[in-house]
């Protein structure tokens, strides 16, 4: 999500402050995300993947 110009920074900071859980943002294409999920399926490194169907429209999968 590299084109978000920092709009999620406050959301992640607030989430971490409220829960103590660190949230990270990555910037990958769909092919990279699918390959990573397949490679990590026995030891996932992420709990959620956030994607956008349309620019500016976050969708949790």
Image: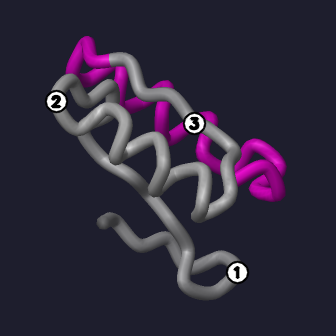
Disc 3 to disc 1, how far (Cα)?
Answer: 16 Å
Residue nearest the observer in this picture, 38 or 21:
38
Q: Residue furthest left?
A: 42
Residue 43 placement: quadrant: top left
Picture layout, residue 52 above or below residue 2: below
- Relative depth, front residue between 9 and 39: 39
Residue drawn where x is 32% and y is 25% of the image: 45
Residue drawn at 42 percent across, 30 percent down: 14
Return the mark for residue 55: 1
Label 1, residues with CA under 10 Å away: few <14, some 14-19, many ≥20: few
- Indicate the quadrant containing the N terminus: top left, top right, bottom left or bottom right: bottom right
Q: Residue at x 51, y 28 (%)?
A: 24
Q: Which residue is mark 3?
A: 25
Q: Which residues are magenta?
A: 1-21
- At mark 2, the secondary structure is loop
- In the picture as drawn, the residue positioned furthest to the bottom comes out as 54
CB-based contact (under 8 Å), mark 3 and mark 1: no
Asked whether, in this view, residue 29 is left or right of residue 35, the answer is right
Badge 2 or badge 1: first in the primary sequence: 2
Display coloring: one colour
Foreground residue, 43 or 11? 43
Q: Quadrant of residue 31?
A: bottom right
* Residue that mark 2 sits on: 42
């Amino acid at each position: 999500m590299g084109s978000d110009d920092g709009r999620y920074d406050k959301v992640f900071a607030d989430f971490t402050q409220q829960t103590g859980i660190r949230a990270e943002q990555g910037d990958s294409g769909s092919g990279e995300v699918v390959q990573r999920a397949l490679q990590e399926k026995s030891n996932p490194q992420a709990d959620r993947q956030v994607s956008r169907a349309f620019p500016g429209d976050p969708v949790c999968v």
